[in-house]
Image (spheres, grey):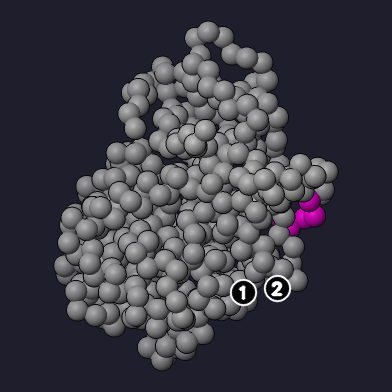
Amino acid sequence: MTHAPMTADTRIALRGDLLDFTADPGFAAPAQAQGVRFRRDHWLLVEGGRIAGVQAGEPGPDWERIDHRGHLLMPGFIDTHVHSPQLDVIASYGTELLEWLDTYTFPAERRHADPVVAAAGAERFLDALLAHGTTAAVVFPTVHKASAEALFAGAERRGMRVIAGKVLMDRHAPDGLRDDVRQAERDCVDLIQRWHGHGRLAYALTVRFAPTSTSAQMRMAAALLAAHPGTYMQTHVAENRDEVRWVAELFPEARSYLDVYHRHGLLNERSVLAHGVWLDDTDRALLRETGAQVAHSPSSNLFLGSGLFDWPGTEGQGAHVSVASDVGGGTSLSMIRTLADAYKVQALRGVRLTAWKGLYGATRGAARALHLDHEIGSLDAGRHADVAVWDWSSTPLMQHRVDLAHDLHEKLFAWMTLGDERLLQAAYVAGVPRYRRAPGPG
Ligand SMILES: [Zn+2]
């Protein structure tokens, strides 16, 4: 696709039904939820790639008008935990976490040592994100520097907000997937200098998980995290019970799995911890104290049989929670399908997740947890115009159900439960159309 260059004075106006959030709806019932902002048939004004405002009336002739009437316009989704090379192993049969890593994931990631494979994988992944309405993501590539390079370069070409870093693994991983502390440090410093703060990119020190990094490597990562302002830290924590037991054997001095990261200086307000299924109250208090967030990955937790995350309990103790696909443990890049799974995980815990809370967690809530709500996650003026344009239905049956809805929440809840990426009509990144669905037959 080619695009007209977006300049500081390029003005476009998108017409449609605008949905975003001004505050966290929490776990209130649909009718009591706060912070929901729905503006039917309004114009979203975009100037120089940023949102300039919203108005009901048609803008003047100095705006290029794009008519998405009858479609739902939302901020692009933010996926706070996803693995770019794991599109190669998504939907792999029959294992839990540790066996899944050994059987499927590590062999697939090893192939990304080849820069040609890494580059093709990064392109495929980023295009797929956009085709699922996801315009920002916190991403694990592989241990290979070239895979991080390819991901950053591809994201920069697309103007996307991507947070990523070379994976750190200096033990308990097969040949071809291990680094060492000195080489890893050199690679991280190079990548930080080249990409961190460049365009819309940020670097994340990326400890795969405690079992695959030595204490020395985690201390090195913590030192870089402290030395380079604005860098993030991403890892996994307390996903699966066998994994939790293994970490307890490896780090007998730690109070808990989460405490391993705390002891190594890796927890701060820019730490993104995937899963957090098997945390306790002391851990959740530590999340609040440090400001670290949980990237809740419901599809992955169901698929790998990992467990049921306590979302309200975690937030109830003051910690931030965002929503993530965790592909390839998760089975879809679609944040809509991810939210449908999030509802089911909470249902099994006796909790009701509204469409409001779910969609907030994949937009403004995620932006807030990442300290990026000044840039993404809402349709407020001044934000980058990362916008997804959705159909209300993708099948006759879905249309039937949506048409029967009595109110907006019922309609959005059916949309979230029955929908997927087939609903996506277009995705804009900083005001530039980066995805448009090909017209169907007839
Ligand atoms: Zn993961």
Q: Secondary structure at mark 2?
A: helix
Q: Is residue 325 above or below residue 201?
A: below
> Where does residue 436 sit, x and y in percent of width and height?
45, 35
* Contact? badges 1 and 2 (CB < 8 Å): yes
Q: Secondary structure at mark 1?
A: loop
Give the residue displayed 70% in from the left and 73% down from the top. 348
Q: Is residue 57 left or right of residue 85?
A: right
Give the numbered dot on residue 9: none
> Where does residue 336 sit, x and y in percent of width and height?
58, 53
For ligand 1, tell me if the residue under mark 1 lies within 8 Å: no
> Where does residue 275 sit, x and y in percent of width and height?
52, 70
Residue 345 visible somewhere in the drawing: yes
Considering the image in quadrants, where does the N terminus appear?
Answer: top left
Give the overall secondary structure of the magenta segment.
loop
Q: Is residue 40 above or below residue 318?
A: above
- Magenta highlight range: 25-30
State how far apart marks 1 and 2 are (Cα): 8 Å
Give the residue displayed 32% in from the left and 29% down from the top. 2
> Where does residue 189 sit, x and y in percent of width and height?
21, 57
Q: Which residue is mark 2?
A: 348
Q: Which residue is mark 1?
A: 308
Q: Nearer the viewer, residue 261 or 330?
A: 330
The amino acid at mark 1 is Leu
Mark 2, Cα crowd under 10 Å, few <14 / some 14-19 / many 20+, is few
